[in-house]
Image (cartoon, rainbow, N blue to C red):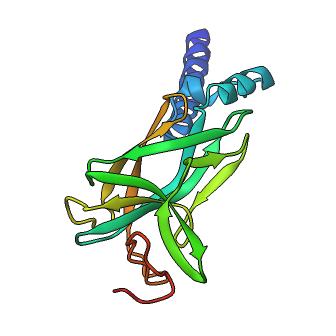
Amino acid sequence: MIVRRVLSAGLLAALAAASVSACGAQSTGQPAERAAAPAASPAATGAAAEAAPPLAITDPWVKTAKKGMSAAFGTLVNNTDAEVTVVSVTSPLSPKVELHEVVDSKGKMVMRPKEGGFVIPARGTHQLQPGGDHIMLMGVTEEVKPGAQIPFTLTLKGGETLKFTAVGKDFAGGKEDYQPDMDMGKDHG
């Protein structure tokens, strides 16, 4: 009888410990098996980095607009050891989407299509920002509201593509209205 009670007490203690351990693992949202998994080895980490897409974009967003034109921004990230060139872009939001730049032309800042596309250096980044390089949407087919999810597809030199979703954001900035060949120093709004 004493042996049974000792075994029962030991079994209950083991079950209680297992129960507490399982609850702790589940509270992190991870199954118990994954919570105790060892850290990735350096070789596994390197393999994951090699599996990264050639190009990524961080913090993509689109300027809100009721109609007409808008623009998309973010940071293009090259994950390769060679330069990558974005040659074109599409979006269901607009029948005409172009890669644009803002340049000085005879003392005026003007917008125009970016000849040759956006070149992202090996292991480098390329900023898409108001007043600089950006993705131009002409004749948007629906209002872009704050929080809208707008899909894009970038085509790279060589034919690879990058699909991403940009978020609609209000932006007053420098009063840009994203009209091609417009003087960026004046309020066109």
**Could you tell me residue 39's position as x and y percent?**
72, 28
The image quarter containing residue 16 is top right
Which quadrant, please, contains the N terminus?
top right
- Which residue is nearer to you in this view: 179 or 36? 179
Q: In this view, does 32 lie above or below 84?
A: above
- Is residue 146 shown to the viewer in this render? no
Which quadrant, please, contains the C terminus?
bottom left
Q: In this view, does 17 lie above or below 134?
A: above
> Residue at left 59%, top 80%?
106
Q: How many marks?
A: 0
The residue sitting at the bottom extreme is 187
> Residue at left 23%, top 72%?
66
> Residue at left 31%, top 53%?
96
**Could you tell me residue 118's position as x and y percent?**
58, 49
Q: In this view, does 186 lie above or below 2?
A: below
Left-right relation of 115 to 178: right
The residue sitting at the left extreme is 142
